[in-house]
Image: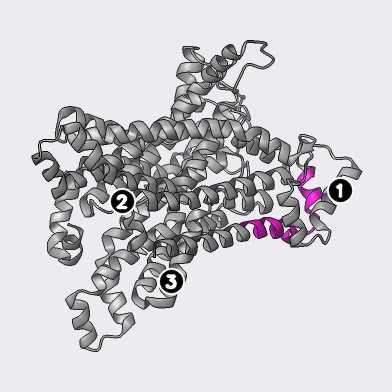
Amino acid sequence: MSTVGLTHGWIMHINIRHKLGRDPWFVIGMILGSVLILLVLLGPPLTPYEPHDMSFRPLSPPSAEHWLGVNDGGMDIFSELLVGMRNTMGFGLLAGFVSLILGVAIGLAAAWFGGVPDQICMRLADILLAVPAVMILIMTAALFRPAPMTLALILSIMLWPTTAKGIRAQALVVKNRLHIHAAKQMGGSGSYIVVKHLLPELFPLYIIGFATKARMAMFMEASLAFLGLFDPSRKSLGIMISYALKYYYLDIWWNWLLPPVFLLTLLIMTVTFLAIGLEKVFDPRLKEAL
Amino acid sequence: MRKGHHIGLVPAYLLAGLVLIYASYILPRLLPGDFVTAMYSSSHVALTADQEDQIRAHYSHGEGFSRFLVNLLTLNWGYSYAFLTPVSGLILGALPWTLLLLGSAHAISMFFGFIAGVEAAWRRGGYLEKAGVGCMTVLEGMPEIGTGVALLLVFALYLEWFPPSGAETAYAMSSPLGRIWDVARHLVLPLSTLVLAYFPGNFLLTRASMVMVLRAQFVQTARAKGLPPARVRYAHAARNALLPMVTRFGLRIAFMITGALVVENIYSYPGLGTLLFNAIAMRDLPLIQGIVLFSSLLVLFINLALEYVYGWIDPRVDYAY
């Protein structure tokens, strides 16, 4: 299944686009995703107030001026929400992207060179897989209080192994195909073959890997923020939930607690649907750590 | 060959464990400047000058790595200034609650997820199966924060069926049976949140691998022999769908821990997650360090144990190396 999809380049391409368009999860994911992206892009002009502005009456209910009311610190909840989602999403996309690049580079290198480099990379991947990434993040965050960007990069260093292993396995299959042998016979250099043949032929794996990694990173960002590991002045869905949860028994849970919970759930759900749809269409057998 | 694979793994895990311990030893010592003052100035814990000196000494004096290792083994993990107790006591006190919560959540979601997955694959194409897969895919997309808060609002705040926080009623003098009932009632909401988070993945994965297994020829043979369907399903086919679930468990551990941390906090369940949250809030560095190191080593150990489970479930795994 996958092998066909992976080798016959663009002929299958049309078919795959057709199949993706018919997969309900992928379509729902795309629709939700476009709405969320639109919210993020239109966020800055849409944000009614500066989210750090504390000059409003604390805990006032939703009104025409404050669509979702004001939190305990006197900040406009709707503005917080937009900025928070942008931060959560940005963190996830960055960590997903960097871990994807690391995973692809290491996976391809391991498959192409084989032997000792392969062994080293894969043992390293095993070790990283055995270490819980959250704990490393918590430790660095608690000790050094790094910028969110730095944490995203550290997370991507912890997340590359699953992608690298998937890429390596598939690259080993492609590597022994006839057209690669032909390219070698023609005198194509290693870098030429890797860049021109292996890299594009594994493309479906990249988007699946990216979606699963971005999902994991968004989930982690929200959770770490919830646990209070980020700078408290940085807006994030996780931190909003954490603060609002302290007052959940008051009558403000529906305008303060529910919106960030809803938005975060929507965000994670969107990425999950996209990942599941892509996985189903591109390779039913490839079960990555979802 | 079989033995070789496992023996080769032990050093890798030992190395990983040592790296973790060393990181935990060296990181606080790499901090620039007087971090003790910087850290505790913004916390709620007021330290006397004496205590501040003590903690500074704990991190800065030339205690070697070997001494650190000995302390680790003798449960001498430092002193928590926020709780005024040794760190080891706090961790070992919270551990049973976390084990109870996570253990039962995994046992329930793996067992029922597996059964449901096998049955769904068997009834492939039916309406019930399609609806089940749809629901589970939606649930799979729900983060623990979302389901946790939703369950809290509905069942603890609105319906008031279950207590919103804690693991047992404080100072309740009751019979042993009453205590078990009390603990169970407190467990329901956090447990349901975690089961809702773990169950869909187990279900979907088992179903997917079972669908592949059912196409195999040996399943047809078993059917052709006239074996009862339940026997074909479980004795012949299902055991082949078991391995992916165990593999997935290992791959998802980091993810699951994050979720469990959050769930414990939502319900103020007195396990390691809530302890860690409080330690972070009070900038209690020795405690944070202790929890992080302890749980990382625990996960490492579970992963190593899983490697043996793979080989036991599916001998082919050993030959693959």
Q: Which mark is residue B30?
A: none
Could you tell me what secondary structure mostly forms the magenta stretch? helix
User: Quadrant of the rendered structure where residue A243 is?
Assistant: top right
* Of the image marks 3 and 2, the number of the one nearer the N terminus: 3
The secondary structure type at the circle numbered 2 is loop
Identify the residue position indicated by label 3 in the image.
Answer: A119
Q: CA distance from mark 1 to mark 2?
A: 51 Å
- Dot 1 amino acid type: Gln
Give the crowd class for mark 3: few <14, some 14-19, many >=20 residues within 10 Å.
few
Identify the residue position indicated by label 2 in the image.
Answer: A287
The secondary structure type at the circle numbered 3 is helix
Q: Nearer the viewer, residue B68 or A181?
A: B68
Q: Is residue B109 left or right of residue B12?
A: left
Above/below status of B180 relative to A167:
above
Asked if the residue at tag 3 contacts the one at tag 1, i.e. Cβ–Cβ closer than 8 Å, the answer is no
Give the crowd class for mark 2: few <14, some 14-19, many >=20 residues within 10 Å.
some
Residue A248 location (% of width, % of height): 55, 22
Identify the residue position indicated by label 1 in the image.
Answer: B54
**Label 1 and label 2 in one chain:** no
Mark nearest the camera among 3 and 2 is 3
Give, as a single range, the part of the protein colored magenta.
B20-40
**Label 3 and label 2 in one chain:** yes
Q: Is residue B114 visible?
A: yes
Q: CA distance from mark 3 to mark 2?
A: 23 Å
Q: Is residue B23 magenta?
A: yes
- Dot 3 amino acid type: Gln
- Dot 2 amino acid type: Lys
Q: Given the image, what chain letter belongs to the residue carrying mark 3?
A: A
> Which residue occupies 39% across, 77% down?
A115
User: Quadrant of the rendered structure where residue A225 is?
Assistant: top right
